Amino acid sequence: MRVCRRANFNAAHRLFRADWSDEKNQTIFGKCNNPNFHGHNYTLEVWIDGNIDPETGYVIDLKIVKDLIKSEIEERFDHRNLNLDCPEFDDLIPTAENISVVCFNLLRTKLDSKYSLTIRLWETENNIVEYSGQ
Amino acid sequence: MRVCRRANFNAAHRLFRADWSDEKNQTIFGKCNNPNFHGHNYTLEVWIDGNIDPETGYVIDLKIVKDLIKSEIEERFDHRNLNLDCPEFDDLIPTAENISVVCFNLLRTKLDSKYSLTIRLWETENNIVEYSGQ
Amino acid sequence: MRVCRRANFNAAHRLFRADWSDEKNQTIFGKCNNPNFHGHNYTLEVWIDGNIDPETGYVIDLKIVKDLIKSEIEERFDHRNLNLDCPEFDDLIPTAENISVVCFNLLRTKLDSKYSLTIRLWETENNIVEYSGQ
Amino acid sequence: MRVCRRANFNAAHRLFRADWSDEKNQTIFGKCNNPNFHGHNYTLEVWIDGNIDPETGYVIDLKIVKDLIKSEIEERFDHRNLNLDCPEFDDLIPTAENISVVCFNLLRTKLDSKYSLTIRLWETENNIVEYSGQ
Amino acid sequence: MRVCRRANFNAAHRLFRADWSDEKNQTIFGKCNNPNFHGHNYTLEVWIDGNIDPETGYVIDLKIVKDLIKSEIEERFDHRNLNLDCPEFDDLIPTAENISVVCFNLLRTKLDSKYSLTIRLWETENNIVEYSGQ
Amino acid sequence: MRVCRRANFNAAHRLFRADWSDEKNQTIFGKCNNPNFHGHNYTLEVWIDGNIDPETGYVIDLKIVKDLIKSEIEERFDHRNLNLDCPEFDDLIPTAENISVVCFNLLRTKLDSKYSLTIRLWETENNIVEYSGQ
């Protein structure tokens, strides 16, 4: 049995590596390399696998997941510049893939090990990534 | 190969246990414990795994799945009070998790064993559960 | 210039008139007349017409509208039974049309008269009503 | 008869006035005032009113509108920082309201005067503005 | 007060005029002129303006509108080729604009004159038309 | 880690077998057997599994996937009649299942074997198929 809670955060970012030339950054990251940043409405799906608790009928109270997403993800990343405001991306390019890894790690440490965790992140309505840990 | 048919039903429900005190029900189930019920538009996704029939190009005719959802799920639960009108929940708290188990069991018995079945149920646009049997 | 804030509330309701026979209620309201109630995820759009304030670039701060919807609508109707829990519907059938009138009146009294107000309410993804006052 | 073409652009922005103190900017614009910017996936709806051309059955070929949105709006604002990269907002706070006015003016000058124009802009799935000119 | 019922139909069509050369059809209608047709999932919104009936709380029972759309629109156009199967388009190019006029006229004759009617038709998620009569 | 790119194409099709009688085609394929075709807006999700490239933070640049979908899928099937214009379906009934197999095979040959591939295809908002190869 899997349960999911969805949430949103709006952030600015830029894809580039300081150890690459401007030309290489432009070739690899194209318009996502705009030095003045651009931004997205990110939609996050947090999927949790576990057994139904026969007492409550819940795998996990989704209100708890909602609050966890708020404290761990939204308060960190919502209305932020991922490159400048968020130390999680000091040495990590804030691609959708890497954002999903960071979200996974932040939530994994707060979640009982009896649960499995999958992160699905929508960067736009056409670009989606999904990560379940290594 | 997996195929899916989506459908909707609108129902009232209340989360509580008769063997718990009002205080405990309120602590565990919060506003979902309103004694006068509240309700949702449920969206059901029925996913069926199987092989393509080379004669028809179908895994299963989705018209059959549509009719099955109508007779087994919609006619049982649409415009009903899950707690009061539906004996399936006489001894089962109608959480999204338990509703998906009930839907799974109702459809599983009607479906050829050559197919695998997964139920995905949206209680709101932010709360989703998924069940594939034990 | 018009601006809109969207919100949701989940409620149970029943369509019927106490001064009608069971037969007439069934004829007119069909399955919406289930005596044990059913329910919906309502989506509310609050549209406000006005001029852009040249100082702020806002017609109205949508954060204010969000808070107003929370205090006036969500706290009243979310996870409630509109017939039993909400005195607004003591003498009013909770059709989508009447719910939108009630929402309009609740917000109209809280909103500066320089603004025009329109309520759009989705009862299901296929049934929508819109009300702008008389 | 009205016709509409939808499109998207992703941009960073910050709401603030240089002639206000940090405190006042924070009070009025809250988290939208983050000095390092945040961002959104903007969805633009361009509505055009006119008569059906009896020869083609079109009010206007939506392919033309699509190309116009691409050249006038997407190439200007997509993957940009509205405050730093876009002179349209040198003296204009990039609220959704003001962005819709700028989009309206850019398209209005390119569109035959026989057509009426309305811009609808989604900043998030819950915040929408609409502008039809003065 | 306005109420709306949404519905869908899936159809094939081709945009062309028999009295034009192939070249002109190609210039004006581009890929929509494919001689072997292409197709769409059309989404129809039927908006009806009227007063709330104080007895029922309805402007009009949306079940009636649903049935009307089924008999007048879906049974005519769903899973049809608009050019070959539907005499309504014998002398009319099946653009979204013209389809909305045909739907308007079909429903207008079935609807009490006390109601105003507006048709909104989605040809794709990015192309929409709206018609309220002349 | 999985990444996904979504795209759309609009096509006409007909479900039938030339080696079956009209009666059998009608019995099996119902209204999808209309000899003059009908059509759909197909939504395609292309899911690719792989490891994050630590240099770029990408599993694969989704711009590459977008271009691949455009050249391999959209240019083949968009605004086409799958039965008449597309040799891929000369001996294959264009059910959603078979379309997804064809899309899978077209993209599989263009994609590095280090990636796993899954195709999800929406024929309507209620009918979905998913294929990951044999």
Image (cartoon, coloured by chain):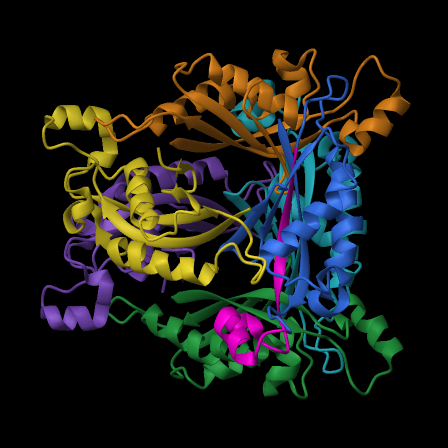
Chain colours: A yellow, B blue, C green, D purple, E cyan, F orange
Vertical side of F113 occupied by C103: above or below:
below
Q: Nearer the viewer, residue F5 or B100?
A: B100
Q: Nearer the viewer, residue C28 or B3?
A: B3
Percent x, y of residue A132: 40, 37
Q: What is the quadrant of residue F86 in the picture?
A: top right
Examine the structure image and report whether residue B34 is included in the region drawn in magenta. Answer: yes
Q: Residue at x 53, y 15 (%)?
A: F105
Q: Residue at x 38, y 32 (%)?
A: F1
Residue range (magenta):
B19-48
Vertical side of F2 occupied by B94: above or below:
below
The answer, for residue D132, to whether it is visible in the render is: no
Q: What is the quadrant of residue C87 in the picture?
A: bottom right
The answer, for residue F50, to whether it is visible in the render is: yes
Percent x, y of residue D49: 50, 53
Along the horizontal axis of the image, is F95 left or right of F20?
left
Quarter the C terminus of chain C occupies: bottom right
